[in-house]
Amino acid sequence: MSPIRRLLVALSALPILLIAVVLALPYLLSLDSIRDRILGAVESSLHRKVEARAIHLELLYGLGARIEGVTVRNPPGWETPALATIDELSVKLALWPLLSRRVEVRRIVLEGVTVAIERNPAGELNFADLGASHHLRASPPPAAGAVDFAVSRVQISRGRFLFVDRQISPGKTVTISLDDLAGEICDLGPASTPCFDLSGRFLADAGRNIFLKGAIGPPSPGKGFADAPFEAIFAARSLALARIAPYFGAARKIDPGVLSIEGALHGSPRGVVNVTGDVALVPPPRSTRIPPFEAKLALTLDGSGDSVAIAQSPFALASLPLRAEGRIDGLRTTAPRLDLRIATPGDVAIETLARLPGFSRSLPPGMQLSGRVRLDTSLQGTPTDLSTRASLDAAPLSVSRAGEPVLAAPAVRATLLARRNAPISGRVTASAGRLQKLPFDELVADWSWNEGALTLSPELRAFGGVLSGRFESNFADPKGESRIRLEVQRVQAGRLAESFPTAGHPLSGTLTAKMSLASRGLAPDALSKTGRGEGRILLANADLKTVELMPKVASALSTIGRVAGFQVPGGFESTRFKTLDVTVRLTEGRVLTPGLSLSGQDVAVTADGWIGFDQTLSYEGRLVIGPGILRGFGAAGRRIADELGRVTLPFRVSGMISEPKVDVDYSVALDLVRRVLPRHPGEWVKGIAGKVVEHVRERMEGRGPRLPDFLRQLFSRPIAPPAEQ
């Protein structure tokens, strides 16, 4: 072979040899010899141990380097051994821009990168010392002719971010992770428009459920990326909130449900950022405490003013449509200030309000609401000094229980005021309506709630008078005492009684009453054991009829009339009373009524006794018949009157309320007979007196009939006395 041909063959093989050398160079030439110097510089900057398994030079497709097994250790005392780990980091540079003093990184690839942020029980973070060391060294001003720097693309795969929290639950470690992070960031440079497209998995078991895509820049001349415009879209779907339950501050583990949020951002980081999107919360199955929630976001973040403005943002809470608007200032301070308004968009069906878990649980079983309602709420102040005002207007409102009407009103208004540690208070008003069968006007009920203690003071007009009261009870203390005060002023008793189906005998007249009651519970059993109270009831201009007393008295007087020669006029047993005046005292399971007084036209009753919670009763009293009624008995009837022209008959009432037993004291008949006997001839009197003496002897021996039966036998036939001599 000629020398020229040999030269040509050698020259043709040279490119192949160069390519082979270039391909083999990264494996033949390792940077391990300078690895310690590189790691030492990084350790000096980070103030912690930095490790790398291998460092290689790369020449294919451009100048570059590949680092394997990078680990940035945590200082001693932290639970997680490493702040960050990278399975493989590779960097590719463009060669030709270096000649023009420009560093252009074509690609940075991060594979298997993990960053672990840890918070210890004292609240300190494992990277806090990095920021401190950075601020101790002033950044040098850029030198004249500084090298331009740009990165074309950063690729991330199998990324992971951990937050290890040892403070939120004392004695426990709570870990939250962002897994399977992947994506890329492109066009990083001082005058470029960087873009990003990232995705990962958060609070989910499988698949990627969070996404962020957008672009920022370019910045205006003389300004940085903090002032550059940006746009982005984001999504976070099916976030299982139960995994971050410790951060909800609940004493026991709760499951709020699954949250999804997606939307768009546009603005600048240090200027104004507009946020729009949708939020949805799906509670766990069979949840009775957490309602479903849906909202459309319309927010404006002001970075310079550190505030957020909320445009009219519609949302639905358990199908109740609402709108929110307002602003929050001082977001970066310890006391941000709120000025928010939440209201229904108009009148909504009150049934939607009843679907709220907290509201529905407060209703007694079987109670139903119907009508239209409008809600308006405002919140103003800082979290430590927050003022809440709310109003609820219902028109109309209907409340029923087990199909029976409880309340009906054409319009009802309720207000609420709450501020810091002060009691929550409010007022309920209704111009007219019906409470069960009680029609009312001008209802005003003030109320307050203080750490479980309820105070309610209602007042209304009904049947020509006023009903008012006060109710106090501490629901937070099961053994606490409840107090009730009731006042009735000149109410038409008959119409009032007709309004309550459980009322007994019909009433009439004008009722005035004042009652007070205290008890450890309001159930009948609690009232019978712990109830105590007092009051007074006055019923005037009434038409009262005793069920058992007057018929018994009429029977006794008829018996006496057989001796005295008179007859009880018809209608006496139906004698009516016009006034009831009684003092009431509740104690030891009984309602005591000392000094009970019934009075009518020339007739009066006074009695002392009680009615028990066990439906028993016991009374002793006197019936006084005046001269006006005795005139109806004729001249013979007036002979049984005393020196004042009256007849007094003692009586007793006992037994059950449903079947009272009334006994007239027949022994008084002997006194009445004694008044009659001196007016009759001797022989006639002797016959009567002899029988009475014989009856007394038999009763002393345990024989003979009782006194009432004896009198009936003695006077079974009218005895006409002989003509007076």
Image (cartoon, rainbow, N blue to C red):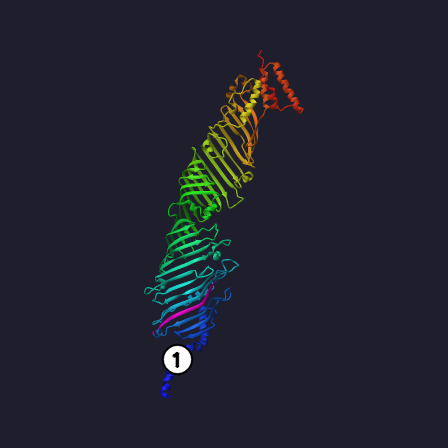
Instruction: Assess whether residue 105 is covered by the magenta stretch.
Output: yes
Q: Is residue 268 left or right of residue 281?
A: left
Find the magenta span and give its range: 100-117
On screen, 29 above or below 339?
A: below
Nearer to us in this view, 238 or 37: 238
For residue 303, say whether it is visible: no
Name the amino acid type tagged 1. Ile
The residue lying furthest to the bottom in this view is 2
Name which quarter of the figure residue 677 lies in: top right
The residue lying furthest to the left in this view is 221
Instruction: Assess whether residue 699 is covered by the magenta stretch.
Output: no
On screen, 161 above or below 515?
A: below
For residue 681, say whether it is visible: yes
Give the image location of residue 234, x and y in percent. Answer: 39, 59
Tell me the quadrant of the picture where the N terminus can be found. bottom left
Give the image location of residue 655, x and y in percent. Answer: 57, 31
Tell me the quadrant of the picture where the C terminus can be found. top right
Nearer to us in this view, 246 or 567: 567
Give the image location of residue 192, x and y in percent. Answer: 34, 66
The residue lying furthest to the front in this view is 1
The image shows a total of numbered marks equal to 1
Q: Label 1: how many residues lie within 10 Å, few (<14), some (14-19) or many (20+)? A: few
Nearer to us in this view, 9 or 310: 9
Question: What residue appears at the point 50 percent right and 54 percent down from the top-left corner?
Answer: 253
Give the image location of residue 706, x and y in percent. Answer: 62, 24
Name which quarter of the figure residue 8 lies in: bottom left
Q: Which residue is mark 1?
A: 16
| Dominant secondary-structure state across the stretch colored magenta | strand
Q: Secondary structure at mark 1?
A: helix
